Image: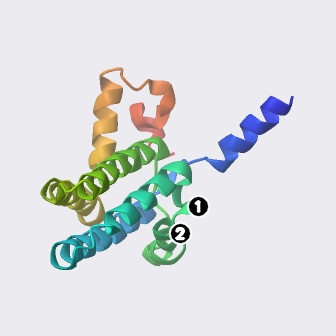
Amino acid sequence: MADSTVSTGLRRTFAFPNPVNEYAARSTAGIIVVLSLATLVLGLTAGWGWLLWIIALGFWLRVAGGPKYSPAGRLAVHVIAPRFGKARLVAGPPKRFAQTIGATMSTTAAVLWTFGLAPAAWALLGLLIVAASLEAFAGFCLGCWIFGRLQDAGVIPESVCEACSNISLRRA
């Protein structure tokens, strides 16, 4: 019984929202674009590559619990997205997958910078800026697209996101 309570508590603590407000996801991506561009400029001009660790931490906080633990996520959900009007809901699992890709890329960039491989770190950050820009400004989530291809290939089971594989559930 105690194991069940702990398991339920952990699941609630690290729950990712499903569905997700697309406007909040796009707003978060816009914040990431701005932070990443500032990090790139400050990293190249002032040696402030340590800011990559802040970006990585933000991604891991969003992976852990969506916007709940992330200052950028909270700003997007509570301040920016409501200005766009009624929420436009999309599936949560692909967004969490996309955040995990961002977390992996930004952490790798931070590690590369820490070990003196700044050009590789800046290249990875550039890819992250491109992906976040696609989400923020064009509404195309590259991580979500990859999620879909993995689901089509059977790598991610349909049960992970039934709305992703059933077009009739996508707007429910």
Q: Residue furthest front?
A: 115
In the structure shown, which secondary structural element does the residue marked by tag 1 occupy? helix
Residue 23's x, y, as percent? Answer: 41, 65
For image coordinates 48% across by 65% down, the residue present is 73
Tell me if I can see residue 65 in this picture: yes
Residue, disc 2: 74
Residue 19's x, y, as percent? Answer: 52, 49
Front residue of 94/114: it is: 114
Front residue of 29/172: it is: 29
Residue type, numbered disc 2: Arg
Q: Tell me, for residue 15, which label it has, or none.
A: none
Q: Tell me, for residue 68, which label it has, or none.
A: 1
Q: Quadrant of residue 123?
A: bottom left
The colour scheme applied to this rendered structure is rainbow
Residue 64's x, y, as percent? Answer: 54, 50
Q: In the picture provided, is 8 more to the left or to the right than 167? A: right
Picture layout, residue 11 above or below residue 128: above
For image coordinates 28% across by 41% down, the residue present is 145
For image coordinates 26% across by 47% down, the residue present is 142
For image coordinates 49% across by 74% down, the residue present is 75
Picture layout, residue 152 above or below residue 41: above
Residue 166's x, y, as percent? Answer: 42, 32
Q: Residue furthest top?
A: 154
Front residue of 153/13: it is: 13
Of pointers 2 and 1, the one earlier in the residue sequence: 1
Residue type, numbered disc 1: Lys
Q: Quadrant of the N terminus?
A: top right
Alpha carbon distance from label 2 to label 1:
7 Å
Q: Quadrant of residue 10?
A: top right
Is mark 2 in CB contact (under 8 Å) with mark 1? yes
Tell me if I can see residue 17 in this picture: no
